[in-house]
Amino acid sequence: GIAHYLFTPLAMAVVFAMLASYLLTRTLVPTMVRYLLKDEAHIYSQTHDEQTPPLNTLLWRIHWRFNHAFERFRAAYQHLLALGLQLQAQVFVRTVALGLLCLALLPFIGRDFFPQVDAGEFRLHVRAPAGTRVEETERLFGQVEDVIRRVIPAKELDTVLDNIGLPVGGVNLAFSDSSTIGAADGEILVSLNKQQHRPTWDYVKELRRELNAEFPDLTFFFQASDIVTQILNFGLPAPIDIQVVGRHPDNYKLAQQIDARVSTIPGVVDAHVHQVVDTPELRVDVDRTRAEQIGLTQQDVANTVLYSLSSSGQAARNYWLNPQNGVTYLLAVQTPQNQIDSVDTLQSTPVVVNGQSAPQLLSNLATIHRGTTSTVVNHYNVQPVFDVFLNVQGRSLGAVAREVDQVLADVKKNLPRGTFITMRGQVQSMRSSFWGLGMGLLFALVLVYLLMVVNFQSWTDPLIIIMALPGAMFGVLWALFVTQTTFNVPSLMGTIMVMGLATANSILVVTFANDLLKEGKDARTAALEAGFTRLRPVMMTAFAMIIGMTPMALGLGEGGEQNAPLGRAVIGGLVGATFATLFFVPIVYSLMRRQQTREHSDETLA
């Protein structure tokens, strides 16, 4: 999915950084220790008064005091671990129960595809009743703009740009992300002061309430303004797109029913049917027999009406090249609008016949009828489609999508023949990305376990090592819950990253305990000494990563909200994994290695 393009560079950077660090720790680091730590090795090899630092320098005094404080902390940790090993069965059961209780946090976290980015701007789409003239639409936009300026303080407002109606000319609207479909539509782009402004979403929430209350006849919906959200929506104006596909004549009514039902779901805002089917039209029915008798075709009549209403530049473009400056100018002919103010004046439009000097009136060749029609007709896989767009506010995208699925499941029970309903947009991408990342996480766990089985030549040691991973998962859950962050693609990437770090720290403890076990010590003593001895490297690794991830977790800088979930997941996972590595892994090691200790004791007695 899209996560592949966004996070492949991150994954490649981590992989090659780890490979380079592994190479340097095996070559350069031992060499530097050999030449740079001669004095430290000499000092530590001598006996000196533990109450005073070996050297009376500022750096050594800081180092000495920190080391004494850490030794007191390590002694307290050893006491707690020894107490836990004495009650290892009870501690194991209670820890597992506490971990299962942490799963109750899942419904409160929610799921999103990507976090919202405060770009300091927003796009408001305004839709007046069908048939509203562009002059009236402009007046309504002025009133809406007054409300915007009333809600947003002048010192926080930078630019307000209105874009009303459709462009005149041969512009292919398929290449535009605008939802404007006629003279009754338009967009307002609001840019806030980059130096000082409240969160953009606070203003959006307030404007939704104010505008819907003051203009009940207008339709308002906010669209993505930043490039990231536009890409994630794949050009759609909302993250959820419910498509009613098929040729049945009642599909528009079905789309309206869906719109009415999903609008009652908590968290759903800006729900609307995109297509407008009641736009007034004037249908010109040409008498083909009469037109053919005087040498005209239906296209000739249609072009004449088009020239009068929209200028000749719409169908037959003529250009004049200015020889003085080399600039080309469009030459177009159009009847003044004040001369076509009714159907009667339109019927008086002269239709020129080639080869004849006297033109024919439109009323002699065609009949004009009033009616309604669709402003725009959309298709998906050739079939006509009606779109119901939904925005989300105050809830996660995944929670809203689940309730929308329930509504659609009920609607699908009585669908007309040949009609089907599907949900597309950001929701579809979110679900496919979550599935892919979930399978990637599972594959990573299995691969790491099998690699450790080959390395340790044992099935038990890798199983003990990965006991730190549930602690990492529970730490991720608590970090996301406390920071009010949803599960999304960045936080899942952070979860995958923290699994490797948790495994590395757990390996330090288990390998040292195995060495002590080979020396003849029992499993409980080996677990206790391994935790006590490996406390410093485990803490150093965890704190170094936590400190490095803190700026990212705070979401500092413009667009920092996008990567903040990754940093928060890594920090929470490392905190949970560190506790699991220092307390839970030694207890599991002691429990699973008891039989091996007994066998070793029996061999010694024999």
Image: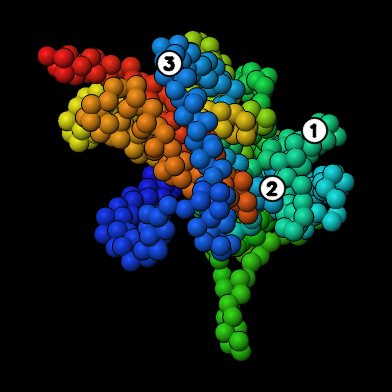
Q: What is the quadrant of the C terminus in the image?
A: top left
- Closer mark to the observer between disc 1 and disc 3: 3
CA gap, disc 1 to disc 3? 61 Å
Residue 122 numbered tag: 2
- Closer mark to the observer between disc 3 and disc 2: 3
Badge 2 marks a residue whose secondary structure is strand
CA gap, disc 2 to disc 1? 16 Å
Pick whichever, 106 or 311, lies toward us. 106
Which comes before the other along the chain, label 2 or label 1?
A: 2
Callout 2 amino acid: Phe
Which comes before the other along the chain, label 1 or label 3?
A: 3
Determine whether, in the image, residue 247 is placed left or right of residue 342: left
Tags 3 and 2 touching, CB below 8 Å: no
Residue 358 numbered tag: none
Callout 3 amino acid: Gln
Pick whichever, 335 or 12, lies toward us. 12
From the top left corner, tell me how far across and down residue 268 is, in percent: 65, 27
Can residue 340 be spotted in the picture? no
Badge 1 marks a residue whose secondary structure is helix
From the top left corner, tell me how far across and down residue 453 is, in percent: 21, 30
Residue at numbered disc 1: 209
Residue at numbered disc 3: 86
Q: Residue at x 40, y 63 (%)?
A: 39
